[in-house]
Image (tube, rainbow, N blue to C red):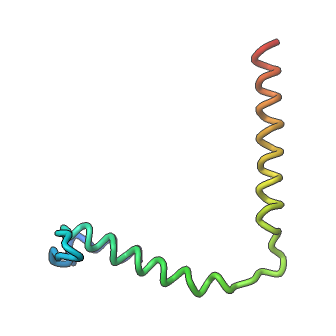
Amino acid sequence: MVVTMLMSGTFLPPAMDLFGLHLLPEQVLFGLTSVFRLTAIIPLIGVFEHRAAPMMLIISHLNDFAKVKVVQYSRWMFK
């Protein structure tokens, strides 16, 4: 995917019309690479890591950390 974007200056696809829209070569290349990225992510959806923490636990820890930092900063700022 990265290689296709780096070589995009050399291998620009031609402009095309899609559903009545005229797409420039850069737009066609962006659309193609987005499809390639999506197809690379789809197989990874089914991967389960045994030692991974649940996402909600991670978000709650980050939220608690941010709250503590904001309170500490406000106490320091408004002494």
* Residue drawn 77% across the image and 50% down it: 62
User: Of all residues shown, which one is farthest toward the top?
Assistant: 79
Looking at the image, residue 60 lies above or below residue 29 = above
Could you say where residue 51 lies in the image, as x and y percent from the top left? 84, 76
- The residue closer to the viewer here, 59 or 4, is 59
Left or right: residue 48 compared with residue 19: right
Quadrant for residue 2, please give it: bottom left
Q: Quadrant of the N terminus?
A: bottom left
- The residue closer to the viewer here, 17 or 60, is 17
* Residue drawn 40% across the image and 74% down it: 34
* Residue drawn 19% across the image and 72% down it: 20
Quadrant for residue 52, please give it: bottom right
User: Of all residues shown, which one is farthest toward the front?
Assistant: 20
Quadrant for residue 25, please give it: bottom left
Could you say where residue 31 lies in the image, as x and y percent from the top left? 33, 73
Could you say where residue 13 lies in the image, as x and y percent from the top left? 20, 78
